[in-house]
Amino acid sequence: MSSKICLSLLYPYLAQASVLGFERSFLLSELGLSETHFKEAMRRLPFSDFLTAVHKLIEITQSSALGLQSGAHYHPSTFGPLAYLMLNSATIGQAYQGFLTYEPMLNEAVKTTSIAKGNSVYNSVVYEGYSDEEVAPLVEAHIASLLAYTNFLSFSPRKGKSLVKEVLFRHGPQTDLSEYKKFFGIEVKFNQGVNSFSFDPVILDFVIPGADTRIVSRAIMELDAIQASRRNERQFRSEVYDFIKEGFYDSLPSATDGASAFAMSMSTFQRRLKEDGTTFKGLVEQVRMDKAEVHLADLRLNLADVADRLGFSDAPAFFKAFKRWTGETPADYRKKIIQKSSDDINHHD
């Protein structure tokens, strides 16, 4: 199922675009958004739409460093209710652990892990299902924001020294190398096997000035309630997805069939899906896409057979849809499957 992300995480990109001289109202108009979209602190949208918006901002501003430079614009409002937990944790370590725990509430598409080993804390950032270059600005913003926010919380930057020991990116440089050194204070390595950064464990012990630890328990209760609500949303979306998927064995189910299966009126059924940021049509397309990849792996089926099994009127309609989903043709996708199988066989010989 498609992941979601909080719209508030777009703030830093808009802020950096404004620094570059672009009016916020103009930017929102170009993105098809308005200020009313931001009134709800934890409003979410599909991650693919968010990614499109970021790349649109890069195109508008002609700034390939937009992701990196937006990292400096993260502030409490960016993280919504999670900010109360982070601002009132006793130390950076506690704040960071809180962030890692509730990060999926902000961004379901990313996974950040942290491991203490020896005299360093190693942190990795992963966006599964997306190419390195596609998510490059988001990865740079993510890592830059965590470091900038650490300074913001502790007010304890080490003068003359970088906050980090090492920064690695899977993608290539998006802007001049001097921009990276200026921001991180060290030489950054590109085209590596991971997106990661490491720092001295002593940073985790930095005290957060003005923290009121009494607020932490209340913040955790609120965050847990939000997560519980999100789990319920995902459960309904998953149930509808499964209903459509099972229906494909007989015939393509309609929205009317779905509403009837869940004992809801059509308006209620559509509203529940809309509240979860999806539609019945969108879920049908998701099922088709997932099934297409499975059927293409079955070399006994020709491409016309696959199109028929997915409920398309003809093969060209399927080809067009698959190209839109994946950026490649069904034939090219199948060639990759065959090549991989051949490589695996040769590897084990």
Image (cartoon, rainbow, N blue to C red):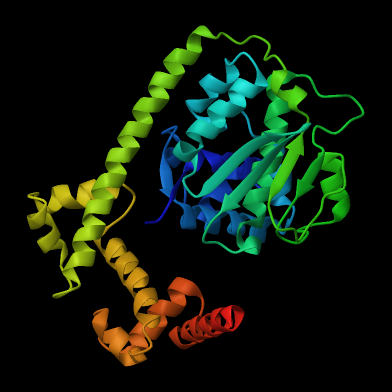
Left or right: 299 as drawn, with respect to 80: left
> Measured from the top left, where is residue 323 in percent x and y?
46, 79
Q: Answer with the quarter of the image where residue 284 lies.
A: bottom left
Q: Answer with the quarter of the image where residue 294 lies.
A: bottom left
Left or right: 86 as drawn, with respect to 150: left
In this rendering, is residue 57 above or below 86?
A: below
> Measured from the top left, where is residue 13 in percent x and y?
63, 45
Q: Quadrant of the N terminus?
A: bottom left
Q: Quadrant of the C terminus?
A: bottom right
> Measured from the top left, where is residue 50 in percent x and y?
51, 52
Q: Residue furthest front?
A: 349
Q: Residue at x 51, y 76 (%)?
A: 327
In this rendering, is residue 210 above or below 193?
A: above
Say which of 103 and 148 sits in front.
Answer: 103
Does any portion of residue 144 appear in the rendered image?
yes
In this rendering, is residue 285 above or below 103?
A: below
> Measured from the top left, where is residue 222 in percent x and y?
39, 22
Q: Residue furthest right?
A: 160
Q: Residue at x 78, y 19 (%)?
A: 156
